[in-house]
Image (cartoon, rainbow, N blue to C red):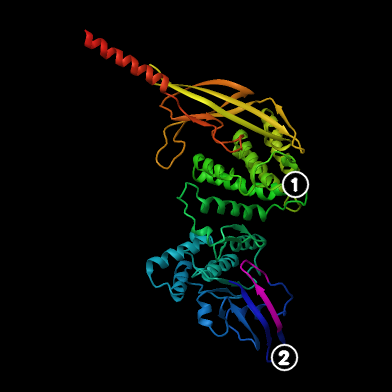
Amino acid sequence: MNLQITNLSKTYSNGVQALKNVTLTIPQGMYGLLGPNGAGKSTLMRMLATLQEPDEGNIHLGDIDVMKKKEEVRRTLGYLPQEFSVYPKAKAEELLDYFAVLKGFSERKSRREVVEALLRKTNLWEVRKQKLGGYSGGMRQRFGVAVALLGNPKLLIVDEPTAGLDPAERVRFLNLLSELIVEQPGNFMGMGVDGSGVITGGEGFFLLDPKGDGFDAMFEIVAHEMGHQWWGVQLKPAFAEGGGVISESLAWYSAMQLVKNVKSREALRRFMSWMRQPNPWPPFRTGLPLLRAMDPWANYRKGPYAIYALSEYVGEARVNAALRTLVKKKASSLATTINLYRELQAVTPDSVKPLLHDLFEVNAFWTFDTKQVMAKKTASGTWQVTLEVEAHKIVADSAGVENEMPVIQWVEIGMFAAAEPGEILGMPLYVRKHFIRSGTQTIVVMLPHKPARGGIDPYSLLDWEEGDTLRKCNFDVYENLHKQLASRSRILYKLL
């Protein structure tokens, strides 16, 4: 829904001409009016808010004539003026509830839910019982936003919202505005963050079924876009090789960690399986290493895979500490992948630095395969599992020439119980790193419970290509032998 302003003019009775033939087309998103005092910014905003009439021209919000259908516009409008008053003795929760009644929320339960949601969104829930007269300037502005957001407005107007605020409160207020998600009409399925930091998504995206195939796009893709909001206001990439890693890879890495910590490693595994699909960026081995990457697959896929893999080898806390240091050092200058790499080197133990080198300095690709998984129950009731696995690593140069390199490193081995409905892996019974070398090798592990499947690199930390490194356990040899022995025992019994 575009906002169309055509030939708008306004001259006040004292002869001051505030607007002269202003024509603008404003699409969905967040936009600012920039101009000196007296340029007519507030006059234009009051006209958009139906509070003032122009001398000439017209305004349309989609198909609605703003000047002729003011009541219809006000039902879809949120407005925070430059100066507004509150009842100083009223509590925030009570006054917002009153404004909600005026906005048309007549049903008490739904109104209470809306009030709570808005107070939480504006970070005022913990102080909802305090009187507004005791609020700071920034808190009052956030309360004004909560009032403006009542009714989920299609048009939100804020007039100099950060005037008079200290720098910290100004940043918090702008972050609040940037957290709004704008839905675009039509069957568009995409989602992104525009230049102002607002998340926009197609109507078709919001109609996706989060339970349809186990992939919760609503949660996981929005998490990525919120990652853009988080990193975008703190870390600016330099216009250099690897710039996409600073922008896209960190946003995807944040989404991956959120999925793992809020949901589970199983949910992250499903998420990464979706990310490995070749559409829209098929993986390819020819190209520059991650430190100099310029291609979409490296920025959107290889980069977050590499940072996440490192976090599983050195610890999430260490990687996050490196990122915090990067943000602190580059707060007033542009960041490069070299800056990122140096901070990661600083937190990586010497034993893991060869892996860090392979992830960032060269185009290294691992291929793991689980040939078979044999399981048998021991006399003590535990389970002995024998896995036959194979490991290879190649390094490709920018021309696509591939060279086989030795695998000499720690790789996870995982064993899992039978999956419950809606699961793929089932409960982890054993997930530990084993020292793996190139070629085929046999690994034996002991488990307290019966396994269902297992294999090498079960969470795809290093093997990023399509396919599954897990296999179902094979009980046939042992179970058939048991059946044969049981059958012979019964026959012997009959003969006797």
Which residue occupies the foreground of this view, 318 or 270?
270
In the image, residue 41 above or below residue 301? below
Write down the residue under mark 2: 15
Cβ–Cβ below 8 Å for labels 2 and 1?
Answer: no
In the image, residue 128 above or below residue 305? below
Write down the quadrant of residue 112 in the picture: bottom left
In the rendered structure, the answer to whether residue 291 lies left or right of residue 320 reads right
Q: Position of residue 236 (x, y in %)?
A: 72, 53
Stretch in magenta: 19-32
Q: Position of residue 110 (x, y in %)?
A: 40, 66
Q: Earlier in the sequence, mark 2 or mark 1?
A: 2
**Distance from Cα at disc 2 to Cα at disc 1:** 54 Å
Residue positioned 70% across, 38% down in the render = 285
Q: Can I make out residue 430 in this image?
A: no
Which residue occupies the foreground of this view, 289 or 230?
289
The amino acid on which the numbered mark 1 sits, given as a three-letter code, is Thr
